Image (cartoon, helix red, strand yellow):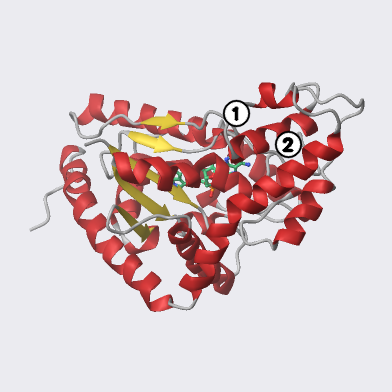
Amino acid sequence: MKRVFSGVKPTGHLTLGNYLGAMRRWSAVDQHEADALFCIVDLHALTVDHDPGRVRRLSRQAATLLLATGLDPKLCTVFAQSHVDEHARLSYLLECVATDGEMRRMIQYKEKAAAERARGGSVRLSLLTYPVLMAADILAYGTDEVPVGDDQAQHVELTRDLAVRFNQRHGHTFVVPRATLPEVATRVMNLQEPTSKMGKSDDVGPGIVYLLDEPEVIRKKVMRAVTDSGRDVSYDREARPGVSNLLEILAACGSGNPEALAGVYESYGSLKKDTAEAVVELLRPVQQRHKELCADPAYVEGVLREGAEKAREMARPRVDAAYRAIGLLPAM
Ligand code: TYM
């Protein structure tokens, strides 16, 4: 059975982008078709200015939401990255295979470092090495597929490069994984700034639909989405980013494709109305289940505890093998 690994970073409340770009597939497809692991990547949340209490709260919330989307601990493994030491252990070895130049070329590093500097802050070293830790997450488990949105594709490419390089230098140790992207909504855009990604840690709140937004809030955000000049509804991501984003969201919520849907609508208003309702209906069962799970925090904790035990057992042999292969003395 193929192995699937993916993760979500608790740096903000989870968004419609996270759901359509990645999480929905994890519960609908991956947990049924693969030996799948899904991880709250809390160590990654420490790479930018953070508040400890907030990271803890967001980590719990992310775990609860993952279960609310339908992840079933009988079918897959759900755990927190910091509970499994193998991630950090392997990350260091991969730092000895990766280069400084590779890290500096990563688009997310460039964007996040520039934003941090613009705020007058300093850039944490862990922001630069972020993709190596991500590679460790993936490679520790012999992962075949990594279901992610488009923004993570470059990191998965780097992971492939590191796996190949390690295998060539030190003998076959790692499976070379590949990214699997959704057909539509691979990059959901901010409703107020449709040329930027809908990111959970961004400042443009009214353009971000959060998974736990009340239906009325979702309706308001979608109805106020920025659309393009002109009036006809057509699908063209370059020329008409606002309308195209709505068409993609609507297509992703149901079936059909954005081009075909464009032909159905004569006005922006009706497109927005249907998109808003589709999002509300898509999130309704997730929100309902989230409410139920919040009443049972012990269950969520138990899932994370058992998940970490399973994950440790899966990761340890391969990480130990990498330690031997790279030239370190075996532990007694
Ligand atoms: P994160 O937490 O930013 O996002 C989680 C997942 O959601 C996808 N995503 C989107 N997809 C479409 N449109 C959007 N606007 C959008 N925003 C986010 C992301 O592509 C991702 O799949 N570095 C990763 C976390 C990570 C990871 C890993 C992922 C750490 N280790 C190992 C896979 C495997 C991240 O920051 O995702």
Q: CA distance from mark 1 to mark 2?
A: 13 Å
Rendered position, 42 above or below 257: below
Question: Which amino acid type is marked by label 2?
Answer: Leu
Badge 2 crowding class, 10 Å Cα cut-off, few under 14, some 14 to 19, many 20 or more, is many
Rendered position, 100 above or below 301: above
Where residue 307 sits: x, y (%)? Answer: 29, 61
Residue 135 seen by the camera: no
Where residue 316 sits: x, y (%)? Answer: 20, 52
Rendered position, 28 above or below 313: above
Task: Look at the image and tell me in which quarter the C terminus lies.
Answer: bottom left
Q: Quadrant of residue 169?
A: top left
Sequence-earlier tag: 1 or 2: 2
Where residue 281 sits: x, y (%)? Answer: 62, 52
Rendered position, 3 above or below 313: above
Question: Which of label 1 and label 2 is nearer to you?
Answer: 1
Residue 8 seen by the camera: yes
Of 275 and 78, which appears nearest the observer? 275
Of 211 and 129, which appears nearest the observer? 211
Q: Is 204 on the left or on the right of 172, as rendered? A: right
Question: Which amino acid type is marked by label 1?
Answer: Gly
Checking the image for residue 256, the label placed there is 1
Q: Is 332 on the left or on the right of 242, as rendered? A: left
The residue positioned 50% from the left and 61% from the top of the image is: 65
Of 66 and 313, which appears nearest the observer? 66
The residue positioned 65% from the left and 56% from the top of the image is: 210
Q: Is 129 on the left or on the right of 306, as rendered? A: right
Which residue has dot 2 on it? 246
